Image (cartoon, grey):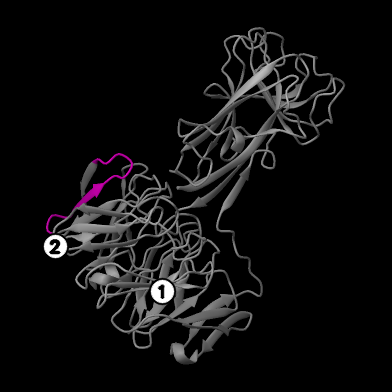
Amino acid sequence: MQSKRSKLPCGRVRGMSLGVLGIIFYTVVAVCSFSIFAPAQTYDLGAQWSDTANPNGPWTYRQGGSALPLISNYSGGGSFGFTQPAWAPSNNWGDLLPVWFKSTVDGGPREFDILTGDVVVHSTDSANGIGEGIANVIWTSPAAGTINITGSIWHAANLGRSNDFFLYVGGSLKATGTVSDGGNYTRSNPLNFAAAVVSGQSLSQIPVSVNEVVELDVVRSPNQPYGTLAGITLQINETTSELSLGLRFDFTGDGKTDYTVWRPSNGTWYVLPSNGERYYIATHWGESGDKVVPGDYDGDGKTDYAVWRPSTGTWYVILSGTGRTASYIWGLNTDVPVPGDYDGDGKTDYAVWRPSTGTWYVVLSSTGKVATKEWGVSTDVPVPGDYDGDGKTDYAVWRPSTGTWWVILSSTGKTVSQRWGVSTDKPVPGDYDGDGKTDYAVWRPSTGTWYVVLSSTGESTTKQWGVATDVPVPRDYDGDKKTDYAVWRGGSGTWWVVLSGSGEIASTRWGLPSDVPVNQPTGRVAQAIF
């Protein structure tokens, strides 16, 4: 494997010949600095606290199933001995609980076991929360992926009372415990959620779908007439499945698809980073006859260089997290490679579809076990995607003879079908509305028109973009988590993209007529249907 980074000057470059790339009049705006986005996003209840908005991003401070209103001068009816903003039903006796707040004092006059910046909750009780719901905070997942949960709880007031906590993911209880007056759990020695995990459960590598909820309930213990204060920390680290599911082909980790071609004549990948880096990246990986199968095979948040060799059925991958190479024999020379994240662990799985039998063969990266599914007939086109938004790739085919999509939803195992397209169309599934679900979409070469059924509304939309000889390359080029209309014009090596975030048009020359544009829909390159 040979990789090199060729330098481009800062600023706007015009009329440049890039040697081995054979590209004339290449145009790009490059900047002199860039940042690499972390492959995972950390959400912190305390660090992301708001005293103005509820819901606040993915966080909602609640009583029962309702978001609490803001009380700007909350004092617990005067019992706290200090006043500060809080989320509570009111500040009136009989109706002032439950309450959530981020402390503005160290202890206060009553010497609570809290410091400035701590998140504090007071559970409801029979005196001051009659008819109110239990105290809870929820985090709603903005994307499909996997999460790791950390955090703690401690008893914050010496009132002879106790609280129980319950931590749920998608309605499934993950951890529970009790903190009480006189117990061992103080601010300096809290009860970590990891030490209170329910048998058979885990707080690590939990698959979540878009809008799936993590809920932390804090309630007064049974036989306790009154609630009490507790300090809370809660962090959720999410690795999204956008790369393993193929929303983006992002080799640099900046959250945007990179313009990338693979040159069969020399087996070299040429990447033009979308992050404004002053280099293009050339990596020799593969040989003539291989099929490009990029994906996030190690789950590090970057797309890995990968090819599948039909002659031997072997997958060859450069793992971006370590730089090491991996190989795996999987498939026959007549198979179609359909890599995706079929188990929802944030890693791309080796997978092929066998037209002769309509069978899918998948090696699940989470367990190493093999999954097989007969789905489709020999004349179908495989169109794997996450059609139900659960963070897992679904088995799916498009039948040109009838224009029908056939999908098995991994979340329920149910099958759905949708008639969309005509026999001469090209299927271009993607998440065009950013709701975390793959949309049915086709591109019609005869008119250059895109036809999309938006899964969020069920409505259809059209866009004329491209000419008959173009290759559709829909991906997320601007990092807004929506698939952009995009084509690659082989005659000139030009990429034409409609950026969904701004509606602006981006065009970049990158590649030769004999190159393979890497950003095609999964399964398309292998079948050479474009």
Question: Crowding at label 1, few (<14), some or many (≥20) Cα neighbours within 10 Å?
Answer: many
Q: Position of residue 526 (x, y in %)?
A: 27, 71
| Relative height, residue 463 to residue 134 (above, below) | below
Q: Position of residue 466 (x, y in %)?
A: 32, 69
Amino acid under disc 1 = Trp
Q: Extreme right residue here? A: 109
Left-right relation of 250 to 177? left
Tell me, for residue 495, which label it has, or none.
1
| Relative height, residue 69 to residue 523 (above, below) | above
The quarter of the rendered structure image containing the C terminus is: bottom left
Amino acid under disc 2 = Thr
- Residue designated by label 2: 379
| Relative height, residue 182 to residue 240 (above, below) | above
Which residue occupies 51% across, 69% down?
Answer: 320
Q: Nearer the viewer, residue 463 or 323?
A: 323
Q: Position of residue 300 (x, y in %)?
A: 52, 61
Range shown magenta = 401-414
Which residue occupies 71% across, 15% down?
Answer: 161
Which residue occupies 84% across, 31% down?
Answer: 106
Q: Nearer the viewer, residue 54 or 384?
A: 384
Residue 405 magenta-highlighted? yes
Which residue occupies 76% across, 32% down?
Answer: 187
